Amino acid sequence: MSRTMPLAENREQTDVLVIGAGLAGLVAAAEALDAGRSVMVLDQENEANLGGQAWWSFGGLFLIDSPEQRRLGIRDSLELARGDWLATAGFDRDTDVWGRQWAEAYLDFAAG
């Protein structure tokens, strides 16, 4: 049987406590370390999932029909990107109106 220690018995000292090991949290931790501070990073995920949402996007950018894609012969368009996004997002609830509007605005931005 495992026993959880009360918080009073499980104290650690650190100069900086970063909540969240996503990209922003990791950058904040690195900057604090570079400044000579001791740092503790607290995240809900384990080490295998380090990076938060950046892990899923691979730190990438979303571009639509860019010059690089055209140069490489990759066929892309705003219509293809919109179809992919909407098929994946599944905006099928009344409460999805703002998410859908954000997606449309982002698609227009990425296509520009």
Image (cartoon, helix red, strand yellow):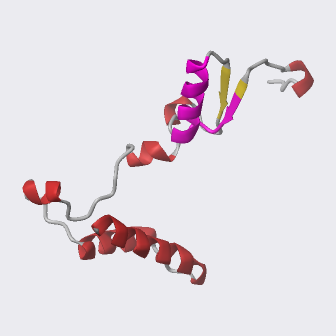
Residue 93 visible from this viewpoint: yes
Residue 13: image x %, image y %? Answer: 78, 18
* Residue nearest the viewer, comparing 24 with 96: 24
Q: Quadrant of residue 74?
A: bottom left
43 vs 74, left or right, is right
Residue 112, given in percent of the width and then of the height, sits at 28, 68
Residue 42, above or below 86: above
Residue 74 relative to residue 78: left or right: left
Q: Quadrant of residue 89?
A: bottom left
- Residue 28: say if magenta: yes
Front residue of this view, candidates 108 and 46: 108
**Which residues lie in the magenta part?**
17-35
Q: Position of residue 11 (x, y in %)?
A: 84, 20
Give the residue displayed 42% in from the left and 73% down from the top: 105
Q: Residue at x 58, y 37 (%)?
A: 25
| Residue 83, position as x, y percentages in the image | 31, 74
Residue 39 in magenta? no
Going by the picture, which residue comes out furthest to the bottom?
Answer: 94
**Side of 38 where 33 appears, left or right:** left
Q: Main secondary structure of the magenta part?
A: helix
The residue at 51%/36% (across/down) is 49
Q: Residue furthest front?
A: 35
At a point 56% along the width and 27% down the height, the residue shown is 31
On the rendered image, what quadrant is the N terminus found in? top right
Q: Splitting the image into 4 quarters, where does residue 80 fall?
A: bottom left
Q: Relative to 2, is 84 above or below? A: below
Q: Is residue 22 visible?
A: no
Task: Work out whether residue 85 or residue 102 is closer to the camera in this orientation and state it.
Answer: 102
